[in-house]
Each structure stands twice: as structure tokens, then as C-alpha cells.
């Protein structure tokens, strides 16, 4: 049976296809979640959480798999680790009012570097600085930057490209290091 036919059978809810899928990928899912579990029994619970999430809401998540973007094993590993992390977080703070849970339970890695870079003032033009700030600091899309500045989106892309070339040259990054 081809991968597409197998996925179609899974998303139609065919029990035989689902049983074969679970048998085939249970070891992979277990390997993906094992490092997040405190013991073997929690790992088994996490594996069950992953398979439950895959078939939940009429196999909604499983239907999002795109073979053009990743292999099924890779995709399942990512889904398994993500599901396991969420489940472990929920279990560790479960039963504790959110106000009493330590802030570290909800911590995420910082997005910005701890220090701002001090660039020479003449390295980038004021417009290039503005475009980079809008794209990276404010997390705006190219079309939003273009609309805000009253310029064409291609001009924004061009300014971004030229600014990045100047930054790479300043920091000594060549194409082979990227």
C-alpha cells in the first residue's frame, strides 16, 4: 500500500490501517518522548497522548501532514516531542492555581539577544535601519513595511538585502559560513 493510500485509510478511520500505523510507529514515538518522561510509565502515557492527538477531531492533525515538506518519520517525531512537552508541562503544574505556579513553569527562551549590537552609525543608511527595525524588532511583514513607509514591497526587499550584505561584510561573514 502506498503512503498516500495508507494516510487516506487512516484519515477515513479504518481500524486495520490505524492498528498497523500504531504498530509501525509506536517505537519511533516512544524514542521521541522517552527523554521527556520521568519514568517508563510516564513515557507510555506520553505515547498514548501523541496517538490520541493524531486521531482527535476526525484526524485533523494527521490530515495536515504534507509529504512534500518532510518524511512521515520526521513529522511524527516533531509532533511527538511537541505533544509530549505540552503534556509534561500540564502535568507538572496541574492542580496548582496559575497564580501559585512558579513563573519558570511558563518560561520561554528569550527572542532578543541580551545585548544590543553597537553598529557604526555610518554602516547603514537611516532608511535601512528603519526597514530592519520594522522587519525584525516589530516583526512586520514586507507588505506592512512597504505600506507604512509608502514604498513598493520590492524596494523594501532590496533595502533589506543591501543592509544584510553590509552587515555580513562588517562582521566578516561570507557565503560559505551562512
Image (cartoon, rainbow, N blue to C red):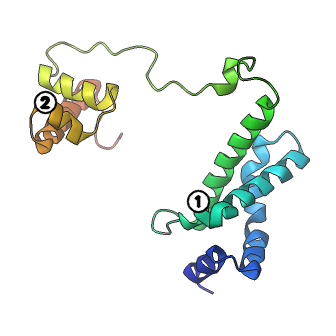
* Residue 48, position as x, y percentages in the image: 80, 56
Residue drawn 29% across the image and 34% down it: 140
Q: Quadrant of residue 76?
A: bottom right
Q: Residue at x 72, y 18 (%)?
A: 102
Residue 138 sits in quarter: top left
Tag 1 residue? 75
Q: Residue at x 33, y 25 (%)?
A: 137
Give the left or right position of residue 155, taking residue 53 as reference: left
Q: Place residue 38 in its image quadrant.
A: top right
Indicate whether 122 appears above or below 46.
above
Residue at the bottom extreme? 1
Q: Residues within 10 Å of mark 1 (few under 14, many from 20)?
A: some
- Reading the chain from its start, which is encountered first: label 2 or label 1? 1
Q: Which residue is mark 2?
A: 149
Tell us which disc is closer to us: 2 or 1.
2
Residue 109 lies, with reference to residue 41, above or below; the image says above
Q: Quadrant of the C terminus?
A: top left
What is the x, y in percent for residue 83?
68, 48
Disc 2 to disc 1, how far (Cα)? 40 Å
The quadrant the N terminus occupies is: bottom right
Q: Which residue occupies the foreground of this view, 84 or 34? A: 84
Left or right placement of residue 33 versus residue 109 in this view: right
Q: Which residue is at 23% across, 40% downward?
A: 142
In the image, residue 160 sits, relative to residue 33, either above or below, namely: above
Amino acid at each position: 500500500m502506498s503512503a498516500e493510500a495508507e494516510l487516506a485509510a487512516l484519515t477515513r478511520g479504518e481500524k486495520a490501517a490505524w492498528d498497523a500505523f500504531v504498530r509501525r510507529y509506536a517505537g519511533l514515538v516512544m524514542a521521541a518522548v522517552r527523554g521527556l518522561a520521568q519514568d517508563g510509565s510516564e513515557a507510555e502515557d506520553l505515547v498514548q497522548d501523541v496517538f490520541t492527538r493524531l486521531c482527535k477531531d476526525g484526524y485533523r492533525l494527521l490530515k495536515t501532514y504534507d509529504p512534500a515538506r518532510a518524511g512521515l518519520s520526521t513529522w511524527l517525531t516533531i509532533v511527538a516531542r511537541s505533544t509530549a512537552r505540552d503534556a509534561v508541562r500540564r502535568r507538572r503544574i496541574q492542580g496548582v492555581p496559575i497564580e501559585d505556579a512558579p513563573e519558570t513553569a511558563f518560561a520561554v527562551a528569550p527572542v532578543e539577544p541580551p545585548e544590543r549590537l553597537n553598529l557604526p552609525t555610518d554602516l547603514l543608511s537611516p532608511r535601512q535601519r528603519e526597514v530592519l527595525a520594522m522587519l525584525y524588532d516589530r516583526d512586520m511583514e514586507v507588505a506592512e513595511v512597504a505600506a507604512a513607509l509608502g514604498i513598493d514591497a520590492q524596494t523594501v526587499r532590496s533595502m533589506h538585502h543591501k543592509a544584510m550584505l553590509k552587515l555580513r561584510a562588517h562582521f566578516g561573514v561570507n557565503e560559505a559560513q551562512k
